[in-house]
Image (cartoon, rainbow, N blue to C red):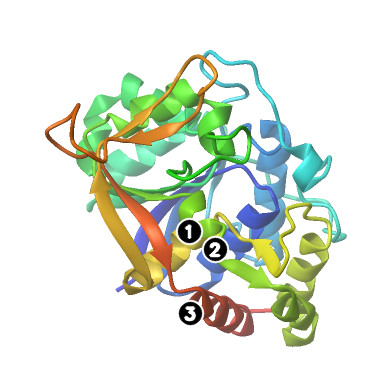
Amino acid sequence: MAQKIMLDMDPGIDDAAAIAIALTDPQFDVQLLSTVAGNVGVEKTALNALKLVEFFGVQEQVPVAAGAKMPLLKPYEDASYVHGESGMPGWDFPAVTTQPVAQHAVEAMRETLMQSPNQLTLVITGAFTNVALLFRMYPEVKAKVDRLVVMGGSLTGGNMSSVAEFNIYTDPHAAKIVFEAGLPIVMIGLDVTMKALLSYDNIAKLSDVNESGAMLQALLQHYADNEATGKPMHDVNTLFYLAHPEAFTLTNYWVDVITEGPALGATVADVLGSHHDTTNVAVATDIDVPAFNAWFMSEVATFMK
């Protein structure tokens, strides 16, 4: 049976790869795709989401909702230096013909959850602003959330500071609200996403697979997140976890989000249990990298175009 999921994202090039998989793999049933200001502004993230749902021809099945334009308290800083000015440069997408739903993403998320006969999995791969607002405004929706699988955080070092990962750093106050919401959370952070690099050899093969692979390859050529042996596909790892949890090593911790000072945006695990007598997050600490690459390429091979 397909996993019913809601996606809250900030596309973004690695988000685009995750969206492509979520929209085309039959094991995922996307109920809503909401966007937030993160990699680029929310007008652009919503437009990029619409480009992708139209590219894959699912605009009638998957609604797109635009959400928060800025963090709760912290000044907004985008990542256009990594993802380009538009957030998804490199491919000539046609002009979109559909629009986001009229509701703000928070309202659309609430409606989707409350109308669902079953609990949904919430996948968060951008700033946590929309979800924090949702939980604060409508706490009753928590009962309709099965779990959260989030791309964010790190126990071993950051990419925005020595300790802070981008999605948490962008809106640490929102991340703190979400991490303390009392729901099951799987944290897919830099501890694994900086290991699960999509190899340059595989990136070079994408255009030979199909049109979707060519599109992703074109985007990745503009993705300024480069390591020696490949590119980190941060957001894609959330879906890899949902598809193959056995490929991950998880450790339960209480994780605090730091909201002030030089460690702003840090995710600190109470490893010794000296401050908390319970846990709130299952943190991914290791990943099967060859399995990730093989899975990613197999996903592209089954894309519908």
Which numbered circle lies on residue 291? 3
Which of 286/92 is in front? 286
Q: Tag 3's secondary structure?
A: helix
Residue pointed to by mark 2: 195
Residue pointed to by mark 1: 192
Amino acid type at circle 2 is Lys
Locate residue 189 relative to residue 162 in the image: left or right.
left
Mark 1–mark 2 distance (CA, rounded to whole Å): 5 Å
Mark 2–mark 3 distance (CA, rounded to whole Å): 12 Å
Locate residue 251 relative to residue 39 in the image: left or right.
left
Residue plotted at (55% across, 55% down): 235
Quadrant in the rendering for residue 184 = top left
Q: Tag 1's secondary structure?
A: helix
The answer to whether residue 107 shows anywhere in this view is no
The crowding category of the residue bearing disc 1, from other C-alpha atoms within 10 Å (few below 14, some 14 to 19, many at least 20), is: many
* Rendering coords of residue 236 (x, y %): 54, 61
State the residue lying farthest toward the left.
Answer: 277
Residue plotted at (55% across, 82% down): 294
